[in-house]
Amino acid sequence: MNRVTFKTELCKGCGLCVTACPKKIVFLDKSILNEKGYHPATVTDIEKCIACAMCATMCPDVVIKVERGV
């Protein structure tokens, strides 16, 4: 299984990762706010993740880490 982790405290909720995901499983979690007052990104269904790392590539603040087969 693949794993995607976010440094939610550093995420500014820009949404670039959301638009970059080809599987459309990354979204901004409107149910929580981080310490800076932003809705951080998260993954809805990790089973659908293909570990392409497009989300991490697009993130200007390097808050996303993608690991294959962990």
Image (tube, helix red, strand yellow):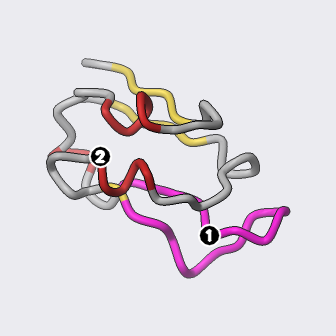
In the figure, residue 14 lies in which quadrant? bottom right
Identify the residue at horizontal 25%, vertical 18% (top origin).
69
Whether 67 is drawn above or below 4: the answer is: above
The single residue placed furthest to the bottom in the displayed view is 31
Q: What residue did someone put label 1 on?
A: 39
Question: Which span is picked out in magenta?
Answer: 27-43
Q: How crowded is mark 1: few (under 14 residues within 10 Å), some or many (20 or more)?
A: many
In the figure, residue 3 lies in which quadrant? top left
Return the x and y of residue 22 as percentages of the image width and height: 16, 46
Identify the residue at horizontal 66%, vertical 51% (top origin).
11
Label pair 1/2, CB-CB below 8 angstroms: no
Quadrant of image for the N terminus: top left
Return the x and y of residue 7 as percentages of the image width and height: 65, 41
Whether 57 is drawn above or below 58: the answer is: above
Identify the residue at horizontal 32%, vertical 28% (top origin).
53
**Side of 18 relative to 22 (left or right):** right
Q: How crowded is mark 2: few (under 14 residues within 10 Å), some or many (20 or more)?
A: some
> For the residue marked with disc 2, what is the amino acid?
Ala
Residue 32 is a magenta residue: yes
Whether 37 is drawn above or below 11: the answer is: below
**Which label lies toward us, 1 or 2?**
2
In the figure, residue 43 lies in which quadrant? bottom left
Determine the secondary structure under disc 2. helix
Identify the residue at horizontal 54%, vertical 79% (top origin).
30
Determine the secondary structure under disc 1. loop
Q: Which is nearer the eye, 44 or 37?
A: 37
Return the x and y of residue 56 as percentages of the image width and height: 44, 32
Q: What residue did someone put label 2 on?
A: 20
Quadrant of image for the C terminus: top left
Magenta highlight: main SS: loop
Spatial distance from mark 1 to mark 2, Cα to Cα?
17 Å
Whether 6 is drawn above or below 66: the answer is: below
